[in-house]
Amino acid sequence: MARISKSDLTKLEIIRVATRMFLEKGYSKTTIKAISDELGMSTGNLTFYFPTKEYLLGALVEMLIDFQWKEMKKYIDEGVNLVLAICFELTSMAAACEEDANIKDFYLSAYKSEITLDMIRRNDTKRAKNVFREYCPDWTDEQFAEAEMLVSGIEYATLMTTESSASLELRIGGALNAIMGIHNIPKELRPEKIEKCLSMDYRAAGKNVLQEFRKFVYDTSDKALENLLKGI
């Protein structure tokens, strides 16, 4: 039987507890001390493995990235156009944030952290090259990366609401139109995709995506523990 690394087991257990607390209690409200208390370890021991809470946020963002690729594959398998799939994703994400304060806090925290925003931008740049290449055939990798700088700002503004913010429908429509415009999708093609997104029950879709994401996080952690114990 393969020897189990105590260090790897401790790191995994920290991630399992921290990500669950972020989703259930909110990232901003969850402190390093609260996580260490839940684990029954000192804060010094925890920060030996993860120097700041942002590194644990990064672990959850990594799971989000994996989840997004899984969702995109599902859309492709169902025959959904890739541009429409990206539009569905943002629509569902915005709706989920309207429904659940903790998931909204997670997304906004991820966009505000330098560590995790870089992760999001690098991943979304890679996805944008797959989705929008037809409309940006001559773009370089640098141009896709520059576009993502703008897109991430639009996404953050869509999720970051105040009492005077526009309705969810207006924010989604404006964001989708802007993102498609950045990637050279002709004006006459954009309204149809926006209408398809807004015609669905996006609030129900947001709740469903939130449930699936939570399940994905818990299943991912359980599988990682199972593989570690098996020595895989």
Image: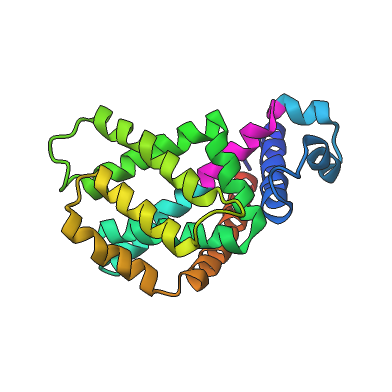
Residue 224 seen in this snapshot: yes
Above or below residue 83? Residue 31 is above
Characterize the magenta stretch by its predominant secondary structure: helix
Quadrant that contains the C terminus: top right
Q: Is residue 99 above or below residue 4?
A: below
Can you give x and y, in whole percent of width and height, for residue 150 in the image? Answer: 37, 37
Count of marks overlaid on the render: 0
* Residue that protrudes farthest toward the front in the picture: 164
| Image-based side of 185 in relation to 230, left or right | left
For residue 32, what is the image quadrant?
top right
Span of residues in magenta: 49-63
Where in the figure is residue 184, as x and y percent of width and height?
19, 45
Q: Nearer the viewer, residue 225 or 46?
A: 46
Horizontal side of 41 relative to 151 (left or right) equals right
Q: Is residue 143 left or right of residue 121?
A: left
197 above or below 162?
A: below
Q: Is residue 30 above or below residue 51?
A: below
The single residue placed furthest to the left in the displayed view is: 138
Q: Which residue is pictured at 34% across the width and 54% down the height?
A: 176
Residue 12 is a magenta residue: no
Query: Measured from the top left, where is residue 11 in percent x and y?
Result: 68, 36
* Residue pictured at 63% horizontal, 33% vertical: 54
Task: Report if residue 56 lies within the magenta region.
Answer: yes
Q: Tell me if residue 59 can be seen.
A: no
Q: Position of residue 48 (x, y in %)?
A: 73, 24
- Name the residue nearer the viewer: 15 or 211: 211
Choose top left, top right, bottom left or bottom right for residue 110: top right
Instruction: Name the foreground residue: 50 vs 101.
Output: 101
Q: Quadrant of the N terminus?
A: top right
Q: Residue at x 71, y 56 (%)?
A: 24
Task: State how the image is colored.
Answer: rainbow
Residue at the spot 54% in from the left edge and 54% down from the top edge: 165
